[in-house]
Image (cartoon, rainbow, N blue to C red):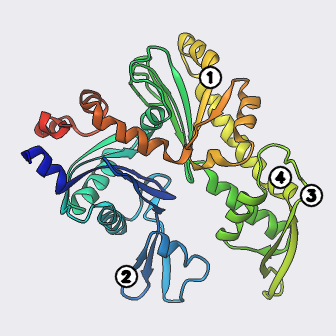
Amino acid sequence: MSFAGLRDLVSDSMAIDMGSTTTIIAVRGRGIIVDEPSVVAVNRISGEAVAIGREAHDMQGREPRDVTLVAPLVDGVVADFERTQKMLDHFVREARSGVSHFSRRAVMSVLSGVTQVEQRALHAAAEHAHIGRVYMVEEGLAAAIGAGVSIDDKKASAVVDIGGGTTNVAVVARGSIVYSQAERVGSHVYSQAERVGSHDIDEAIMDRLRRHHGLIIGAPTAERLKIELGSVIEPAGPSLQRTVKGRDVQTGTPRAIEIKGEEVCIAAEGVVRRLSRIVNRALAELQPEVAADIHDRGIILTGGGALLDGMAEFLQRETSLSARLHEEPRYAIVKGLSQLFDEPLLLRRVARNEQSALLEAGDGAFEV
């Protein structure tokens, strides 16, 4: 066995999409290995993590009184450095193969506009997880590549990635991405990230039930209603209803009500209209030639939030552009990151790492 073959046997190259809602890790040659909630259950007294990922998420709403659930990443950036370290270390250990003891390299997505401080926090968390080298790539570009946009395409393509906490609008051409609302660097790509996501719909559903029905429900129940009854266009069965159980606002006692699909749609309406304004605002800032390309091609929807019933039809109506849902919207970013392993020169060009770090890495970091 060659040295390169032996090295690949005992190490893993990983693509990591660590978001506010979910962490997804794909290992080269093995596909997607980790797809778990980005949450940590913490003992209030000792501060120790008692559960991470799906095990912690399953506690939501029913966690023991001495346990609290913590989301280490908020709106796509590190909010709790220590718990982010522990969470990433846990997921990376899950992703490693049985004979692997370390990860030679990883490509990790970061939100557009991430600061150097936030980027260093993610880099330090990756080092703590025993990853040899980590390269940061903006999630807008990763989503575009994962959605099938060619890096050699001279014409522009638009991708709207709707996550749990953020919505990222990226317009990509020639495999390049440049983001800044305040400054323009070139004319190849524009990207705009906003703190609006599918979790805002959950909050809107909870708020409507509290205001109009005097019923307090938890986030898991709101998410279930969104999935089962939610739609951003007029639902096929507006009278379809579900029994919802929670706590009465006035008496504090358990109570159940019937909720119709049209009420869930009303609750979601304000959030999706904010989302459409974000998309239209980003498109309004494009150069004329780029706008012409988008007019011909329309927009591609990625991210878990894009799975909400009618999202493509709604954005098509609001933007007057064709809109299509990627076949696997939740995995577009991680698939785009994985493809960068096969494009070492592109990876070097688009990585958000400080230039000195890239120079120190050398060509060997990108060996196939």
Q: Are marks 3 and 4 in contact (CB under 8 Å)?
A: no
Q: Amino acid at mark 3?
A: Ser
Q: What distance separates the C-alpha of mark 4 from that of mark 2?
A: 40 Å
Q: Where's residue 266, x and y in %?
A: 83, 52
Give the foreground label among 3 and 2: 3
For this view, does 342 lie left or right of residue 138? left
Q: Earlier in the sequence, mark 4 or mark 1?
A: 4
Q: What distance separates the C-alpha of mark 3 from that of mark 2?
A: 46 Å
Q: Amino acid at mark 4?
A: Ile
Specify few, some or many for label 1: CA neighbours under 10 Å numbering under 14, 14-19, or 20 or more: few
Q: What distance separates the C-alpha of mark 3 from that of mark 4?
A: 13 Å
Instruction: Find residue 314 and name its label.
Output: none
Instruction: Find residue 284 and name its label.
Output: 1
Choose top left, top right, bottom left or bottom right for residue 345. top left
Give whichever of 268, 229 is nearer the camera: 229
Mark 2, residue position:
47
Q: Earlier in the sequence, mark 1 or mark 2?
A: 2
Q: Amino acid at mark 1?
A: Ala
Could you tell me which residue is drawn at 80 percent across and 63 percent down? Answer: 208
Query: Does the image show residue 362?
Result: no
Could you tell me which residue is drawn at 55 percent across and 79 percent down? Answer: 59
